[in-house]
Image (spheres, grey):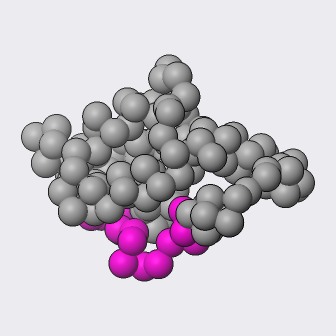
Amino acid sequence: MQFSELAIAWESRRLGDKRALHRLEFQMEDALSAYTILFPDNQDTMTETMALLKVATELETPIEILRELVTGSVSQLLASESSETQQSQYSLDEVLRLRQAILKDFTFIPTSKQLSEPEARLFWSTLIRD
């Protein structure tokens, strides 16, 4: 299953369609990957402060300036960077590997640009503990 399918269903659910995720047809392996994406363990996430520090370092910007830009959550701010991007071709397993790379020291900004806004909203909201 493509990550974009899960992200679109998750976004529809977020916007009020209570059955959106139920309509997805999962193979067992994809169901386990989707569960891991939607309900990550604490060690597979980071705090908003950690995320802001990583982005501030990448942009060579003081963290105080980034804090001023955050009007909702850090995950929403990062997702907004993806608004004009087409859907990615990532599988669910590739997204799990990408999450681990981000946690280890992968760059945030190029990752944001690779995801569509619904994909980025799901990715960042499950990676960053708001």
Residue 41 counted in the magenta span: yes
User: From this viewpoint, is residue 62 visible?
Assistant: no
Q: Nearer the viewer, residue 97 or 112?
A: 97
Q: State the image coordinates of residue 36 (x, y, percent, origin top left).
A: 54, 69
Q: Residue at x 53, y 52 (%)?
A: 92
In this picture, which residue range is highlighted in magenta? 36-50
Number of disc labels: 0
Judged left or right of residue 111, residue 129 is: right
Q: Is residue 75 above or below residue 128?
A: above
Q: Nearer the viewer, residue 20 or 71?
A: 20
Q: State the image coordinates of residue 49 (x, y, percent, origin top left).
A: 30, 64
Judged left or right of residue 73, residue 105 is: left
Q: Nearer the viewer, residue 103 or 52?
A: 103
Residue lying furthest bottom in this view?
A: 42
Quarter where residue 66 is shown:
top left
User: From this viewpoint, is residue 12 visible?
Assistant: yes
Q: State the image coordinates of residue 10 (x, y, percent, origin top left).
A: 70, 50
Q: State the image coordinates of residue 6 (x, y, percent, origin top left).
A: 66, 48
**Chief secondary structure of the magenta portion:** helix
Q: Residue at x 79, y 52 (%)?
A: 25
Quarter where residue 121 is shown:
top right
Q: Nearer the viewer, residue 80 or 70?
A: 80
Q: Residue at x 27, y 56 (%)?
A: 101
Residue 79 counted in the magenta span: no
Judged left or right of residue 23, residue 46 is: left
Q: Residue at x 16, y 43 (%)?
A: 58
